Amino acid sequence: MVEWRESTWGAEISLEYGKGIRGYADAVGPYRVFGSNGPVGWTNEPLAPGPGVILGRKGAYRGVQFSKEPFFVIDTAYYVVPKSEMDMRWLYYAIIHHKLGEIDDGSPIPSTTRAAVYVRDLSVPRLAEQEAIASILGALDDKIELNRRMNETLEATARAIFKDWFVDFGPTRAKMEGRAPYLASNIWSLFPDRLDDEGKPEGWIRDPLGAHILNLDSKRIPVSGSDRAKRQGPFPYHGATGVMDHVDDYLFDGVHLLVGEDGSVVKENGLAFTQYVWGRIWVNNHAHVLQGKGSVSTEQLLLYFQHETVTPYITGAVQLKLSQGRMNAMPFLYAGTDICEAFSATVAHFFAKYRANADENKMLAAMRDLLLPKLMSGEVRVKDAQKFVGEAS
């Protein structure tokens, strides 16, 4: 490797201990607080300037984080201080590449010690090349983060519309109070002018949820871990709370909502574990596989489950379960064909953009993961990587 010098981590950086701090989990402040696994809260006073790198010190998972802004680190993690001028984002990627967070000293509580890190070898390019490498990888990560934040906004917007229409009955209450319309006239006219004796818009029906979902549970097939190891492929294999593996075939294609059935079923706030998924996937028998039925879209179902607690419908003291029968019995306020179809049309572009952003992030992450070891080892030079990224974007 031309112009790369051989060194050790101890010669290049110091790992500084974080400090104890109280109340960070519930605090409101401008500076992020990091622990061993990542962000854990906020504070008004930073411990280290940005940009900076945080390396987990204790725990089964010791992650690596990068902060552009000043930050605070609690005592389960280190923050990195270079001993000479170095690009901090390049250091972040170098720490990932060298898997410093996976070093284990063998103690009962998994830990990464400074002594174990400092003796490891490290190849260091010139500062200009550090900056160039960090620029390429950082641009990919920045775009991933931008898409992720955009998706948070898109989902929050759709959730707010759902809440206004189907939880707070905003349009009907506005009509009752004589306020000006705030929706398009063709949608505004669909809402009733008053609430009935039950406090819901006139004409809306309280149905069992089962009347408005297409349940595809009968098509689920679990695959054992040993079989999955033999059947590795491109298709995500979903469990109750997320992707467990990837296999060589799929059971479902299209847009679906997965709702945890047993094991990890309910969150601390009483809401179900849900996964909004699309494309070709495999699902085991620990998640219900649902689609909307009739005028109720799969997206409306997703937002319904983000508001409706499932705790009263859970059975089992040790092994929690949300059975199909109990889920079908959950109350669903049906606003009628016209309003449900208008809602689906209103949020459709939000979710189309959400899916496109998430798909792009998968591509960008794959590109980053391909380039990172090649750039950090000097196998691929910066100009070649820039050309590769340009052709792929």
Image (cartoon, rainbow, N blue to C red):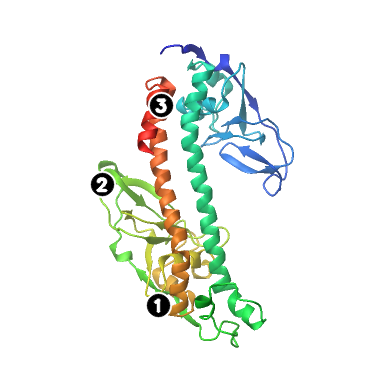
When asked about the image quadrant of residue 268, the answer is: bottom right
Mark 2 crowdedness (10 Å alpha carbons): few <14, some 14-19, many ≥20: some
Indicate the amino acid at tag 1: Ala
Please report whichever mark, 1 or 3, sits nearer to the chain's N-terminal start: 1
Identify which residue, 197 or 129, lies in the foreground: 129
- Image marks 3 and 2: residues in contact by CB distance under 8 Å: no
The residue at the far bottom in this view is 197
Residue 130 position (above or below residue 224): above
Decide which of 327, 343 is in the foreground and name it: 343
In the picture, the disc for residue 248 is: 2
User: In the image, which disc is placed on residue 373?
Assistant: 3
In the rendered image, residue 306, in percent from the top left (x then y), is placed at 52, 63
Q: Tell me where residue 206 appears, x and y as whole percent.
A: 49, 81
Callout 3 crowding tier (Cα within 10 Å): few <14, some 14–19, many ≥20: some
Locate the N terminus by quadrant. top left
The percent coordinates of residue 219 (x first, y second) are 28, 63
Q: Is residue 319 among what the camera can see?
A: no
**Residue drawn at point x = 52 percent, y = 25 percent:** 90
CA distance separating discs 3 and 2 = 26 Å
Which type of secondary structure does the marked residue at label 2 adopt?
loop
Decide: is 11 above or below 184.
above
**Disc 1/disc 2 C-alpha distance (Å):** 34 Å
Q: Residue 85, labelled with which disc?
A: none
Give whichever of discs 3 and 2 has the lower sequence position: 2
Q: Residue at x 61, y 32 (%)?
A: 77
Check disc 2 and give the amino acid type.
Asp
Q: Name the residue under label 1.
A: 211
Give the side of residue 362 with respect to residue 204, left or right. Answer: left
Q: Residues within 10 Å of mark 1 (few under 14, many from 20)?
A: some
